Image: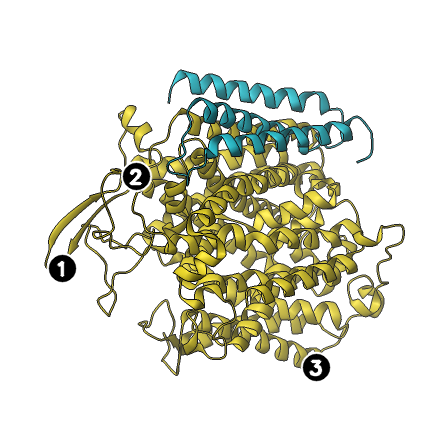
Amino acid sequence: MNLGAMIVACVGVLLAAYCLLPNWRFPMGIDVRLPIGAMFAFVGLLLTVYGAARPLASQSVGVNINLTWGVVLLVFGILMILLGRRRSQGRSV
Amino acid sequence: MNLTAVDWTIMLVYFAFVLGIGVALKRFMRTSTDFFLAGRAIPAWICGLAFISANLGAQEVIGMGASGAKYGIATSHFYWIGAIPAMVFVGLFMMPFYYGSRARSVPEYLRLRFDEKTRGLNAISFAIMTIFSSGISMYAMARLIQTLHVFDALFGRMNLSYSAIFDFSIFLSALIVLAYILLGGLTSAIYNEVLQFFLIVAGFLPLVWLGLKNVGGWQGLAQKLPPSFTHSWKGMGSPSTNPMGVEWFGLVAGLGFVLSFGYWCTDFLVIQRAMAADSMSAARRTPLIAALPKMFFPFLVILPGLIAVAVRPGFVSVGLDVKFKEPGHGVSALSLNDPTQHLETAWPGKGLIPPKLDANGNLLLDSNGKPLYDYDLAIPMMLLHYFPTGVLGLGLTALLASFMSGMAGNVTAFNTVWTYDIYHAYLNRDASDHHLLWMGRMATVFGIAFSIAAAYVAVKFNNIMDMLQLVFAFVNAPLFATFLLGMFWKRTTGHAAFTGLLTGTAAAALHHGLTLPSGQSFGIKGGWISVMHTYPSEMAQNFWTAIFAWSTCFVVTLFVSLMTKPRDEKELVGLVYSLTDKPKEEGLAWYLRPAVLGTIVLVLALVLNAVFW
């Protein structure tokens, strides 16, 4: 495990805090879609970047699974964040 | 296992979010209701996902993968027969009493409906079992981490002894679960369970996709595997014609009815999540909402098992070192880390499933001289086979997450039952709400401590997992009969419920002591009184034990009820079907009505059964 991974993990925690902080004013707090969205967006982005930088397809039946799945997770994460945001801004879902 | 920085980062990010959620929720834990019941403020869809996620421990994920490799798609019976009908039943017919009675736990409902001694019996047996369950989850996770050499590279670099990896895994998982439950109570557990649900899907969906792509889809699987593997009802007429060794009646009555209803309708671990819902309608919909993903989980966890036996590991880059002594051939060493090694001829496993080895690296053989396979490694081997670094970290994190969600479920159920049903009921009746909240936090701490102890007991006695399965069957099967009679027959009395539970459990033990699955020696597998009957398989014995236990409890409860004085009907309003108003569902869109949802779920389950007939 190296310093790079630690830095990245810390960024992740900060991301989590950012998503969670503004919503503390809500009863029983956070719309759960926000931390979920944040985590998947982060992981999705990480996998997408890694998959693009280092294509690995021989093990995974010829598919660059990091890139493909990374994009899917990123999209999912963003969707969840948007859904969660709409709810916390008072609009009904 | 060769994990890189990307894999570790994904794992760390997950842990960071899990703890972060706990931290964020701490300030909302003001009353005991907030801590134990999430303030009864959780929307239906969140409760639903938590309901299924708490149930989905890693033993289920690993175990279902193992069963899929062993029995094929017939394993889906555990879901489509063994879960869906029960989930629909509890949502439609039992939640009105659980939620409407304002009981804060399952034992508390028993006190309201019956009497104190019934509650005590259930509370104590449940508390003990749930702690053992949590400990076994911890044990299984630590064992898996050890087998897959997850932390080996890390420990190597830090010059720490490899033997500490097991202990490290136990304490790491314990600390993380302790932290987020201590901080945020049930709400934290529920939110994390939803996160874990999505993570499990994210980790296993690509695995199934790649696996199916590799074998040529379902058609390809059907060609590569024996027909019994791809047809769930084939040969169910008699135990000798199907790999599970049980006939359809034992399956439907034992698994489909008694065991599954016994679990889904009475186990506080799942019921607690529905009790946390924000309304009666939400509580009723929770198990139904959970049933939808539950129905499709066979494709996520069972299918990899099938694929694992259909694939030849011609080219693998896994982290297992297998040494085995082939009879007459001396010692062969296979380092599965070497991708250039051709394994077609030398590999003694079944598909991707490695053989079981003893401590010296020799093949373990059964009574017929055939090698035994370590089916529990089906899913981990699949992950290692198809996932390059990157998604491998994701898959591994998903696996760890499923272990932890099971543990967290057990711990929240324990701390609630301890605080309300044991401490508040028997030890300190005048405790203030604030004190109970404190007690709940303490209970979390010693609950986890006991779980760790249970995990180490499992190290010493590895039959403990089988034992726990047995005990669950002994206790849950009769409990379901008690609930059925209690909720739907106003004449059932407290004395009857108590006696019924005791005799039901005794009947289960008796049945187990007098029967033996074929090919097993007496002891933990049964026949410890004397062998009066032999069952064709362990599963058959299991199912029939459950049937006997349930029937005994039912009959005894019925008779004793007729001989004892029932309670005043006024006291039972809201607790019994005939004395409670049917819940009204006006103002709800038609597709959100529980009855409609329930029907949709059942129809879908029937369709799935038909498709994989």
Q: Position of residue B507 (x, y in %)?
A: 51, 76
**Callout 1: few (<14), some (14-19), or many (20+) C-alpha neighbours within 10 Å?**
few
Tell me how far mark 3 sits from mark 2, CA to CA: 65 Å
Q: Amino acid at mark 3?
A: Met
Tag in front: 3 or 2: 2
Going by the image, does B188 lie left or right of B329?
Answer: right
Q: Is residue B545 visible?
A: yes
In the figure, the shade used to draw chain A is: cyan
Please name whichever residue, A46 or B577, is drawn nearer the observer in this view of the structure. Answer: A46
Label 1 vs 3, first from the N-terminus: 1
Picture quarter with the N terminus of chain B: top left
Q: Is A53 located above or below residue B119 in the figure?
A: above
**Callout 3: few (<14), some (14-19), or many (20+) C-alpha neighbours within 10 Å?**
few
What residue did someone put label 3 on?
A: B563
Asked which secondary structure carries label 1, the reply is loop
Q: Is A6 located above or below residue B207 in the figure?
A: above
| Chain letter, disc 1 residue | B
Tell me how far mark 1 sits from mark 3, CA to CA: 67 Å
Q: Position of residue A63 (x, y in %)?
A: 45, 36
Q: Position of residue B460 (x, y in %)?
A: 32, 52
Q: Is B346 located above or below residue B474 in the figure?
A: above
What residue did someone put label 1 on?
A: B327
Q: Residue furthest right?
A: B587
Asked which secondary structure carries label 3, the reply is helix
Q: Are marks 2 and 1 on the same chain?
A: yes
What residue did someone put label 2 on?
A: B319
Q: Amino acid at mark 2?
A: Gly
